[in-house]
């Protein structure tokens, strides 16, 4: 085996072989199991897409019916999970609540029968079914309300919006939300998927796999960017302020949220679809003041940073869509997680098929052969920068 050079962020280093999704970052193409994302967004549903990702082929009608039926009847949460959620601080971030709840599922269902296809199938169904219920339940509970029970007569997307807003959604809103879930369902070996795969490779249970991925998705350089985009648009406030803001970011070398991607060097195809979805929503439910600011940002950033391949990524327009659907800003990333569970589970299943524990190497940069100095012989200094103890905290 030849050792390769250290590449920060593992850029360009293959860490797996996968047949789940394909990205062409230069041409701006994304395919799930070989099918173009535009075609899936146009013709498919989230659950059909999840089935495709996890089991590798589009389902037949009876297969899809059975899958949807199972998901529909596993949406409810154990009352102990709801009770546990009642103890969460209402000021806590919903991603932290979701990570705790996903991990807690392992307390109820873990048997680690990873060689049993029935166990695999049940874990897939439970996670896809229960994660949206958890997100909606936390939202209502932190407002001091009881969570509403899922409605068996509503499909996946409509039921989530119903549980969140306590009213049946408009059909266009539900369809657009379903397309958002398709767009966010999978994206090769990104940070959270890699996290899921590393956890999966230890042969732990799927609830731990998803919990670790949720924690990774939460960061502002990954799924958390969609929240920051909206905050950024709000802070900019008006179209006239856009160009000075972009210039300031470039001068200070600070990242502009919702732009740039490790793989895409052109506009992310999901951003293009999300932008169209936002426009459909604005047409039916009224304009959003921030859309004009977003358009000007895209123009300004493309002019100034396009030569570096910095264009809108999936997080740039998704917030504007979610806002119109009545989803609070700090639920944008949990909503991303609802969709990405499908991709994480597909990679979990693929990882189990040909598993080897992830154990990369490192380039050691520390000292060696140092003597152990007894405490009494060390200098009596206290570097407050290194370690601060505050009795009040
Ligand atoms: N704004 C301004 N400059 C940028 C941006 C940005 N958003 N993204 C990259 N650049 C610049 C960098 O400053 C760097 O410039 P240099 O060549 O002068 O050093 C160059 O482009 C390369 O940037 P890296 O940070 O090395 O790119 P990397 O592949 O490591 O990072 C990332 C990709 C994390 C997505 C980055 O573009 C970023 O931080 N974007 C903003 C956060 C964001 O929107 N994240 C969501 C990504 S999509 C997702 O995870 C679902």
Image (tube, rainbow, N blue to C red):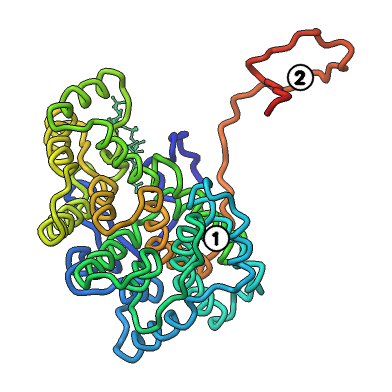
What residue is rendered at 38% in x and 58% in y? Answer: 335
Q: Is residue 293 above or below residue 154?
A: above
Task: Please tell me whether mark 1 or mark 2 is closer to you in this view.
Answer: 1
Q: Residue 209: give its label.
A: 1
**Is residue 114 something that shows in the picture?**
yes
Q: Residue 26: give its label.
A: none
Residue 154 placement (x, y as % from top left): 34, 79
The answer to whether residue 173 is left or right of residue 88 is left
What residue is rendered at 29% in x and 65% in y? Answer: 182
Residue 192 placement (x, y as % from top left): 45, 52
The number of numbered badges drawn on the structure is 2
Q: Along the line of sight, which residue is nearer the eye, 298 or 267?
A: 298
Quadrant of the image containing the C terminus: top right
What residue is rendered at 42% in x and 58% in y? Answer: 337
Give whichever of discs 1 and 2 has the lower sequence position: 1
Q: Is residue 93 above or below residue 108?
A: above
Label 2 sits on residue:
370
Confirm or deny contact between disc 1 and disc 2 (CB under 8 A). Answer: no
Q: Along the line of sight, which residue is nearer the eye, 110 or 326?
A: 326
The answer to whether residue 174 is left or right of residue 378 is left
Q: CA distance from mark 1 to mark 2?
A: 39 Å
Residue 190 placement (x, y as % from top left): 39, 50
Identify the element where label 1 is drawn. Answer: helix
Where's ligand 1: which quadrant? top left
Q: Is residue 72 above or below residue 311?
A: below
**Is residue 356 something that shows in the picture?**
no
Identify the element where label 2 is drawn. Answer: loop
The answer to whether residue 242 is left or right of residue 106 is left
Mark 2: few/some/many CA within 10 Å (<14, 14-19, 20+): few
What residue is rendered at 64% in x and 23% in y? Answer: 366
């Amino acid at each position: 085996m030849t050792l390769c050079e250290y590449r920060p962020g593992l850029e360009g280093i293959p860490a797996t072989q996968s047949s789940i999704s394909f990205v062409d970052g230069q041409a701006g193409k994304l395919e799930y199991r070989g099918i173009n994302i535009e075609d899936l967004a146009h013709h498919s549903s989230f659950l059909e897409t999840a089935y495709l990702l996890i089991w590798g082929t589009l389902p037949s009608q009876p297969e899809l019916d059975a899958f949807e039926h199972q998901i529909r009847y596993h949406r409810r949460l154990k009352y102990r999970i709801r009770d546990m959620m009642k103890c969460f601080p209402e000021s806590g971030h919903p991603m932290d609540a979701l990570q705790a709840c996903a991990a807690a599922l392992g307390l109820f269902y873990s048997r680690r029968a990873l060689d049993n296809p029935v166990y695999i199938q049940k874990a897939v169904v439970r996670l896809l079914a229960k994660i949206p219920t958890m997100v909606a339940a936390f939202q209502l509970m932190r407002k001091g309300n009881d969570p509403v029970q899922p409605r068996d007569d509503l499909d996946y997307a409509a039921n989530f919006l119903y549980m969140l807003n306590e009213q049946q959604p408009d059909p266009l809103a539900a369809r657009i939300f379903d397309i958002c879930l398709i767009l966010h369902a999978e994206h090769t070996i990104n940070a959270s998927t890699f996290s899921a795969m590393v956890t999966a490779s230890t042969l732990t249970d799927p609830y731990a796999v998803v919990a670790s991925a949720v924690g990774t998705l939460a960061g502002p350089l990954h799924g958390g960017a969609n929240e920051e985009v909206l905050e950024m648009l709000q802070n900019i406030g008006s179209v006239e302020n856009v160009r000075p803001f972009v210039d300031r970011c470039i001068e200070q070398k600070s990242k502009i949220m919702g732009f740039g991607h490790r793989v895409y060097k052109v506009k992310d195809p999901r951003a293009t679809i999300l932008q169209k979805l936002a426009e459909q929503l604005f047409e039916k439910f009224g304009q959003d003041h921030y859309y004009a600011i977003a358009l000007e940002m895209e123009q300004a950033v493309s002019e100034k940073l396009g030569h570096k391949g910095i264009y809108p990524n999936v997080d740039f327009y998704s917030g504007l869509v979610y806002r119109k659907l009545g989803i609070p800003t700090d639920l944008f990333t949990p909503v991303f997680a609802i969709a990405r569970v499908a991709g994480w589970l597909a990679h979990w299943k693929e990882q189990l098929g040909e598993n080897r524990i992830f154990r990369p190497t490192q380039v050691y940069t520390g000292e060696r052969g140092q003597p152990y100095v007894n405490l009494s012989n060390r200098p009596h200094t206290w570097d407050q920068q290194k370690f601060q103890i505050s009795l009040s905290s």
